[in-house]
Image (cartoon, grey):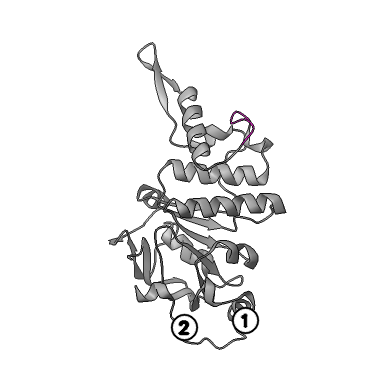
Amino acid sequence: MEYLLEVKNLTKRFGGLVAVNNVSMGVKEGEVVGLLGDNGAGKSTLIKMVSGVYRPDGGKIFFMGKEVIIDSPMKAISIAIETLYQDLALAENLNAYSNIFLGREKLKKVLKFINVLDNDYMLKESKGVLDRLEIEIPSLRNRISMLSGGQRQAVAISRSIYWNAKLLIMDEPTAALGVTEQKKVLDLIRLLRSQGIGIIVISHQLYDVFSVADRLVIMRRGEKVAERNIKETNPDEIVSLIVGAEKVSEKICPADRD
């Protein structure tokens, strides 16, 4: 099966510092890949190259089988790559449906020449995507500041899915959430996978990653040091790979044989 997203030999330098060195990885449709590593391992820099924040100094990015140049976040969004950072980029003073349409608001004409927000349309469409994702929020008219952390995460995910994201990158999606809300977010990731969305999850929560991921990519000091099928590894091995306590053996994931 062909990769939805594939990066080959990506490299990024900041002056004399090599933040990402010759990293290759891929994600298929309907697959969750955990991107793991300690602080400073290069995970965020790698993801920012895919999401258009940084331009690579070397290597290539392929999306849906074609080489792409992602030179801005808007370019990434335009080709259906959405990134959810820890701050979620939500406007706290706006309500839930306004955030789903943030920057892409639906307008209607009044008196044939005055453009105003079509709130009824945005509310209806937002309810539709939330129903599709089996998300319950008491009122979409409530300001984001009134919602819980899990509900905010759900709104951010719903925004990406409404705008037809094919690849979703999630940076620490369960950070600062309670146990119940963590479970809801993980259930939502599983639902997205079942709907064919490719997902990259960056997390320090190994239990969460093991509960949803199909494969794991481990980085250390800017390099990819290992890749494991989730069914053929365990948290102890992954921790050892992250900290460099285990010699990397030549294991090939089934995905690499396709």
Q: What segment is highlighted magenta in the picture?
A: 137-142
Quarter assignment of residue 114: top left
Q: How far apart in space, not on screen, are marks 2 and 1 (Cα)?
A: 15 Å
Q: Does residue 10 appear in the picture of this structure?
A: no
In the rendering, which numbered label is found on residue 240?
1
Secondary structure found at label 1: helix
- In the displayed structure, would residue 246 be above or below residue 87? below
In the image, 1: left or right of 180?
Answer: left
Q: Picture coordinates of residue 145 (x, y %)?
A: 66, 37
Residue at screen point 55% across, 46% down: 89
Q: Nearer the viewer, mark 2 or mark 1?
A: 2
Q: Is residue 101 magenta?
A: no
Mark 2, residue position = 251
Residue type for callout 1: Ser
- In the displayed structure, would residue 161 be above or below residue 128? below
User: How many badges with numbers are in the image?
Assistant: 2
Residue type for callout 2: Lys
